[in-house]
Image (cartoon, rainbow, N blue to C red):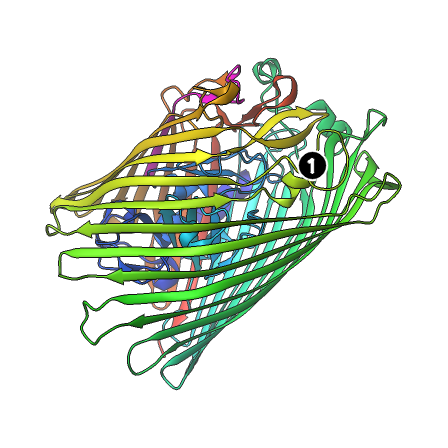
């Protein structure tokens, strides 16, 4: 830690510098958490460009300051929990990703992201079977995030219980800009250190502009057997053709050679030593080694009548080597199951937006289609302490094809009323070719399809009060991993597992009743049938089934109060009454999501270029299993994070040192749970107090 203190002190006193675009100074005191403001901006997550003030859906927007200012930028929970209706549970386990839940969708995930559509610069990070990875998303390279809450399959298809659209930072206005961001820190346990560095470059010449971001993150982990390393490269280029067409290229490369999995703990283990790891995870060397590469080409064209045409083609390759803690059949104490997946994905997205008439209030139609194809070569082997053997347990090729034509209509018959409606048909086919025939041929095929729709309206009573209402539907297929994992260990697809369907009813409002106060509020009812849930683990592995229905009912409130220009106070509250309905789970709480979740924040601009930001998060108790036999305690008085920084100028050089303190009061709490963990092994603890130091140094040319 001493070297980070020396670095921070040197940077503070080295030279005064101004924060231009790479590290922008906030002199306006505006609310940087824009999820509750009514700024004059448009959102595109609804697949039509609509004013945020009038859109008849619950949409939250985060800008670069919200996502990055003095933050660690290693987890999406740092910023996304500022949005009401969104709960991100950080497992502090880089082998499994964080659990992102929007109105209950995604809550069943014990690894990866489920039930939600994730986009990066308009390109899906969600596969055609509904799995999502954040592998190519570098949170230090983001300029904006839009979050659409509620069932959205009529817009984006399979697994769209909510949508998160990330946008990478665009090129600076000048010919060249460069930013270096370095940070590091540690927690209470000796050896619990981490660092992250990022280099961001921007260039512009004539009609061509581009960016390049390269970063590395490495952590020892605050628990035993939890070290991780992530390297990322994201590059983009835009070329303006003739003033009416924009061509774009995006390249994303990620390499994570290590992501040790400490596993979940029992209550007794957690009380004895929350920094420990599950014995089998250590003994069997549970880990993950993954590389993922994505390339996309696109073009956007506007004709003289103002009609828009958009086309993208993209491809993805992913290689995963994943020694699990799940035991091998009849294996020794250090032998487990080794998953090896080689994945190739390709897709095409095409759409057009046309206005019927010359008046601004004329109806507007957006229509198009999405096509995605995925091929997985999956092999399960026996491994001994993480080293794979030649003993094959499963060898099969899985293919998924998704086709989804859609249409969306937007019409404002007068300046106060905005109407929106749309529909989409999705066809998803799963094919499996069994290449391990020692136990018979389990080749199989399944097809799932659904028609989804939405209708909404908003009415503007001026800035003070803009109510809206909408009804929307969603459907979600099982992922291939959920389909092929069967409790009896056989190959092929689980024929008893089908898609779940949802209808969402929502009434909400947003407004600015006073110059210093803005708000957003929504009440929603979700009706999910054939809900996909994880049943109890068998042999340390997760299996899934359809469990009747769930009622996901709740309310969301977001408020911003700006008493003076230099100070903004924010609050977000989510009331989540998510219950199983019918069958043997009737009345039980949906596990993995708290019934009450608060995020309180402060953003301040201090004299002499300093700023102080903070947030305080409270969570009620969380059920850890479907039967509700295990309930994890609430966070008590809550968890406080503080961030202090300074921004200054010296010619064209920009400097922004910062200091962060997570879990200020050193509270002991459970950050997440493993759903239906075997033998009560459900607890995923959070680190105690963490201190980190860092700085951004930027340079830009004006001409």
State the extent of the magenta-drawn residues as a range: 614-630
Residue 558's x, y, as percent? 26, 38
> Considering depth in this image, is 182 or 423 the residue closer to the camera?
423
Position of the N terminus, as image quadrant, is top right
User: In the rendered image, is residue 11 in sight?
Assistant: no
| Helix, strand or loop under label 1 | loop
> Considering depth in this image, is 156 or 680 the residue closer to the camera?
156
Residue 230's x, y, as percent? 61, 49
Residue 353: image quadrant is bottom left
Residue 25's x, y, as percent? 30, 56
Position of the C terminus, as image quadrant, is bottom left
Q: How many numbered tags mark residues here?
A: 1
Q: Which residue is mark 1?
A: 485
Q: Is residue 127 above or below residue 546?
A: below
In the picture provided, is 641 more to the left or to the right than 256? left
Q: Give yes or no for residue 148 being in the magenta stretch.
A: no
Q: Give the residue at the far bottom of this rendering.
A: 242
In the picture provided, is 656 more to the left or to the right than 212? left
Residue plotted at (43% across, 45% down): 474
Residue plotted at (40% across, 24% down): 665
> Considering depth in this image, is 331 or 566 the residue closer to the camera?
331
Q: Is residue 101 above or below residue 268?
A: below
User: In the rendered image, is residue 304 in sight?
Assistant: yes
Local packing at callout 1 (Cα closer than 10 Å; few below 14, some 14-19, many 20+) is some
In the picture provided, is 601 more to the left or to the right than 166? left
Residue 37's x, y, as percent? 23, 48
Residue plotted at (84% across, 45% down): 436
Q: Is residue 687 above or below residue 659?
A: above
């Amino acid at each position: 830690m001493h070297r980070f203190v020396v670095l921070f002190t040197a940077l503070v006193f080295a030279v005064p510098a101004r924060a231009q675009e790479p590290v922008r100074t906030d002199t306006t005191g505006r609310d940087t958490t824009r999820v509750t403001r009514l700024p004059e901006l448009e959102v595109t997550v609804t697949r039509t460009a609509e004013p945020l003030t009038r859109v008849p859906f619950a949409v939250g927007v985060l800008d670069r300051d919200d996502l990055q200012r003095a933050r660690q930028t290693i987890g999406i929970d740092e910023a996304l929990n500022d949005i009401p209706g969104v709960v991100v549970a950080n497992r502090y386990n880089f082998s499994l990703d964080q659990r992102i839940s929007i109105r209950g969708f995604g809550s069943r995930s014990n690894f990866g992201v489920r039930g939600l559509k994730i986009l990066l610069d308009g390109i899906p990070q969600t596969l055609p079977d509904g799995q999502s990875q954040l592998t190519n998303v570098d949170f230090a390279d983001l300029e904006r995030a839009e979050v659409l809450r509620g069932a959205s399959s009529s817009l984006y298809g399979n697994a769209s219980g909510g949508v998160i659209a990330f946008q990478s930072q665009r090129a600076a206005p000048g010919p060249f800009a460069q930013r270096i961001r370095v940070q590091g820190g540690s927690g209470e346990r000796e050896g619990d250190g981490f660092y992250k560095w990022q280099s961001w470059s921007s260039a512009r010449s004539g009609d061509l502009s581009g960016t390049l971001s390269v970063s590395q993150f490495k952590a020892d982990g605050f628990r035993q057997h939890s070290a991780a390393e992530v390297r990322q490269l994201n590059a983009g280029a835009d070329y303006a053709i003739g003033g009416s067409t924009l061509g774009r290229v995006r390249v994303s490369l990620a390499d994570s050679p290590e992501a040790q999995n400490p596993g979940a703990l029992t209550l007794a283990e957690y009380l004895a030593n929350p920094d420990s790891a599950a014995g089998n995870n250590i003994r069997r060397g549970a880990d993950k080694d993954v590389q993922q590469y994505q390339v996309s080409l696109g073009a956007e064209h506007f004709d003289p009548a103002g009609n828009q045409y958009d086309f993208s083609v993209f491809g993805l390759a992913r290689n995963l080597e994943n020694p699990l803690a799940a035991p091998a059949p009849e294996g020794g104490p250090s032998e487990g199951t080794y998953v090896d997946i080689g994945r190739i994905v390709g897709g095409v997205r095409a759409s057009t937006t046309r206005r019927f008439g010359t008046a601004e209030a004329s109806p507007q139609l957006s229509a198009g289609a999405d096509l995605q194809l995925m091929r997985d070569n999956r092999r399960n082997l026996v491994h001994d302490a993480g080293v794979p053997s030649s003993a094959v347990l499963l060898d099969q090729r899985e293919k998924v094809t998704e086709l989804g034509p859609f249409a969306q209509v937007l019409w404002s018959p007068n300046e106060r009323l905005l109407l929106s409606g749309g529909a989409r048909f999705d066809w998803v086919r799963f094919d499996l070719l069994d290449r391990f025939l020692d136990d018979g041929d389990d080749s199989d095929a399944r097809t799932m399809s659904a028609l989804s729709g939405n209708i909404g309206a908003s009415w503007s009573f001026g800035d003070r009060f803009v109510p809206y209402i909408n009804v929307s539907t969603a459907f979600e297929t099982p992922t291939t991993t959920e389909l092929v994992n069967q409790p009896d260990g056989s190959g092929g697809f689980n024929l008893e597992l089908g898609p779940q369907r949802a209808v969402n009813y929502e009434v909400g409002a947003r407004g600015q009743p006073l110059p210093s106060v803005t708000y957003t509020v929504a009440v929603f009812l979700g009706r999910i049938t054939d809900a996909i849930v994880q049943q109890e683990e068998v042999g340390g592995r997760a299996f899934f089934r359809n469990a009747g229905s769930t009622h996901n009912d709740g309310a969301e409130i977001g408020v911003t109060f700006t008493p003076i220009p230099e100070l903004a106070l924010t609050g977000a509250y989510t009331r989540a009454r998510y219950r199983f309905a019918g069958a043997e789970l009737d009345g039980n709480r949906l596990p993995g999501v708290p019934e009450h979740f608060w995020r309180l924040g402060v953003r301040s601009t201090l004299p002499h270029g300093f700023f102080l930001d903070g947030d305080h998060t409270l969570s009620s108790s969380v059920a850890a299993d479907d039967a509700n036999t295990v309930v994890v305690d609430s966070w008590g008085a809550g968890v406080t994070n503080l961030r202090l920084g300074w921004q200054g100028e010296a010619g064209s050089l920009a400097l922004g040192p910062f200091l962060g303190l997570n879990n200020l009061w050193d509270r002991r709490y459970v950050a997440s749970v493993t759903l239906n963990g075997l033998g009560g092994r459900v607890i995923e603890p959070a680190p105690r107090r963490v201190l980190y130091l860092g700085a951004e140094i930027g340079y830009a040319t004006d001409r």
